[in-house]
Amino acid sequence: MTNLVIESIGYVAILTGFFAITKKDMGKFRLWHLISSFFYIIYGAMLNSVPLVIAGIVFCIIHVYHLIKMYDSNKGPKLKT
């Protein structure tokens, strides 16, 4: 794979991470940071960088866990005020 493709994936990871931190809603932040982490996993794999892949996987697990927890807590009945 060419360096341009690999670097482009790295830049997409950075940009989605920067976009994630602009989100005030925690769910949107976690979703966008999850996407960023996924790109970091791909980028790290292309670079054969085990620490980058491990960090991306850990972030993905953390964000998926919290997104599921947020989804489950929002499934209950809503009180209308």
Image (cartoon, rainbow, N blue to C red):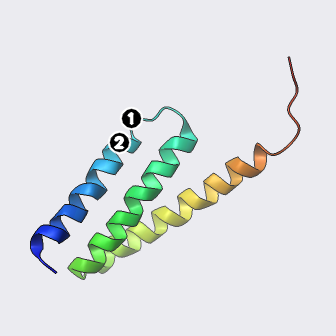
Q: Residue at x 27, y 56 (%)?
A: 12
Neighbour tally class for label 1: few under 14, some 14-19, many 20 plus, Cα within 10 Å: few
Position of 61 relative to 26 (above/below): below
The CA distance from mark 2 to mark 1 is 5 Å
Q: Position of residue 62 (x, y in %)?
A: 55, 60
**Residue type beneath disc 2:** Phe
Element at badge 2? helix
CB of mark 2 within 8 Å of CB of mark 1?
A: yes
| Residue lying at the far left of the rendered structure | 3
- Is residue 69 in sight in this rendering? yes
Position of 27 relative to 49 (above/below): above
Residue placed under numbered mark 2 in the picture: 19
**Residue type beneath disc 1:** Thr
Neighbour tally class for label 2: few under 14, some 14-19, many 20 plus, Cα within 10 Å: some
Q: Nearer the viewer, residue 54 or 76?
A: 76
29 sits to left or right of 10: right
Q: Quadrant of the N terminus?
A: bottom left
Residue placed under numbered mark 1 in the picture: 22
Element at badge 1? loop
